[in-house]
């Protein structure tokens, strides 16, 4: 069993972390609460506390700050770090953590080779943590506001043209579209359906035909529309991970063996330059 050190935003989060860490904890974990200082200040305090209490494992919530503080503490301690863990376990003296991989289509199990190990726990796992678990508070705060050595001089909202995560309908296109000028065809269909426009990564990143916020996939937007139409998109795993939760997936692809047909609800084997005008006509565009 391990000596666990918890880093948490507040007592409630510390309790949820203690419950998730219970299977590996040899006794009540120590806890260090955030004092609202910069991540680098709190990470230094966390690393120092880890040494003081002889922690084998440091656990934090996979919040924005938790992830940053944990990663920085791991760097200071030269420790292994797994973020967004769904669960932790110990068997035969070896500590393991499970986390989603490939954009959530699989779960990977990671083993730590050295101690201390640093983990952040997925917020979904913390939300489901129920039961009683005690922890002993080591220090009230990991740092104080006075530790700020940066000043925010200006803040500007990023101009966003679209938020695909909220779209009910998306018409997405990929490299099957031959040239940038043809985006007009896709726009006409999207307009007729009241849909937003999405794209695969090569369209946004390599060809730069659309801004990055139109990109769907593991490194783009994770979308859950009622309708997702994929035009000339092969259906690579990284794209699939971003749109697999769409209620209805319609794929148009000239290659009947394109992977996208494996998960499309409706598949049309055909040329988008013929199918898109036909769809426009069908919806009265
Ligand atoms: C770390 C990493 C992260 C990545 N993240 C993402 C991501 O977030 N999102 C993403 O999309 N990709 C991502 N990728 C890239 C991904 O692996 C694929 O390369 C990419 O999705 C392919 O884009 P595509 O389907 O547009 O192009 P292609 O794979 O080239 O497919 C084009 C398709 O169009 C079809 N086609 C061609 N002409 C026509 C026509 N006239 N009519 C109908 N169909 C036609 C072809 O049959 C083909 O299936 C990532 C890759 C890596 C390594």
Image (cartoon, rainbow, N blue to C red):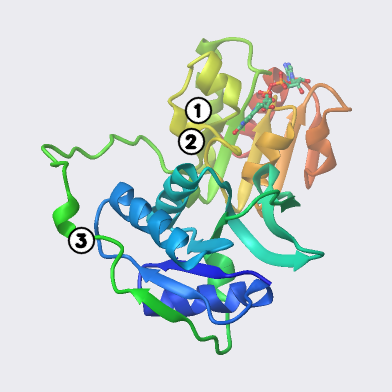
Q: Which residue is mark 1?
A: 187
Q: Position of residue 149 (x, y in %)?
A: 16, 43
In this image, 46 relative to 185: left or right? Answer: left
Q: Camera-side residue: 249 or 213?
A: 213
Q: Quadrant of residue 213?
A: top left
Give the mark, 3 or 2, whose residue is nearer the N terminus. 3
Q: Which residue is mark 3?
A: 144
Residue neighbourhood size for the residue with mark 1, other residues' Cα within 10 Å, grouped as few (<14), some (14–19), many (≥20): some
In this image, 108 relative to 160: left or right? Answer: right
Residue neighbourhood size for the residue with mark 2, other residues' Cα within 10 Å, grouped as few (<14), some (14–19), many (≥20): some
Q: Position of residue 65 (x, y in %)?
A: 38, 55
At 51% from the left and 28% from the top, the residue drawn is 188
Q: How far is disc 3 from disc 2 in space, using C-alphas?
A: 52 Å
Assign a secondary structure to mark 2: helix
- Whether residue 122 is visible here, answered yes or no, is no
Q: How far is disc 1 from disc 3 in space, using C-alphas?
A: 52 Å
Q: Quadrant of residue 56?
A: bottom right
Assign a secondary structure to mark 1: helix
Residue 191's mark? 2
Q: As displayed, is residue 201 above or below residue 223?
A: above
Assign a secondary structure to mark 3: loop
Q: Camera-side residue: 218 or 258?
A: 218
In this image, 39 relative to 169: left or right? Answer: left
Residue neighbourhood size for the residue with mark 3, other residues' Cα within 10 Å, grouped as few (<14), some (14–19), many (≥20): some
- Whether residue 181 is visible here, answered yes or no, is yes
Q: Position of residue 32 (x, y in %)?
A: 38, 69
Q: Quadrant of ligand 1?
A: top right
Q: Quadrant of the C terminus?
A: top right
At 67% from the left and 65% from the top, the residue drawn is 88
């Amino acid at each position: 069993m391990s000596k666990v050190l918890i880093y948490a935003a507040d007592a409630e989060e510390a309790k949820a972390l203690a419950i998730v860490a219970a299977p590996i904890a040899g006794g009540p974990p120590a806890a260090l609460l955030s004092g609202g200082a910069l991540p680098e200040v709190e990470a230094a305090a966390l690393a120092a506390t880890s040494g003081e209490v002889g922690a084998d494992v440091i656990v934090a919530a996979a919040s924005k700050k938790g992830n940053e503080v944990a990663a920085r503490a791991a760097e200071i301690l030269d420790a292994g770090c797994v973020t967004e863990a769904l669960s932790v376990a110990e068997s035969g003296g070896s500590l393991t953590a499970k986390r989603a991989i490939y954009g959530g289509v699989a779960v990977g199990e990671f083993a730590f080779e050295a101690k201390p190990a640093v983990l952040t726990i997925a917020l979904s796992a913390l939300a489901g943590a129920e039961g009683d678990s005690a922890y002993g508070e080591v220090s009230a705060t990991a740092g104080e506001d006075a530790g700020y050595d940066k000043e925010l001089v200006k803040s500007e909202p990023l101009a966003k043209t679209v938020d695909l995560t909220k779209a009910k309908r998306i018409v997405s296109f990929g490299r099957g579209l031959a040239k940038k000028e043809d985006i007009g065809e896709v726009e006409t269909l999207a307009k007729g359906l009241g849909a937003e426009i999405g794209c695969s990564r090569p369209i946004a990143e390599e060809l730069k035909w659309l801004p990055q916020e139109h990109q769907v996939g593991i490194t783009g937007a994770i979308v859950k529309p009622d309708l997702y139409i994929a035009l000339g998109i092969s259906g690579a795993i990284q794209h699939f991970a971003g749109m697999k939760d769409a209620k209805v997936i319609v794929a148009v692809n000239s290659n009947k063996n394109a992977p996208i047909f494996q998960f499309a609800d409706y598949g049309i084997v055909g040329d988008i330059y013929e199918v898109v005008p036909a769809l426009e006509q069908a919806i009265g565009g």
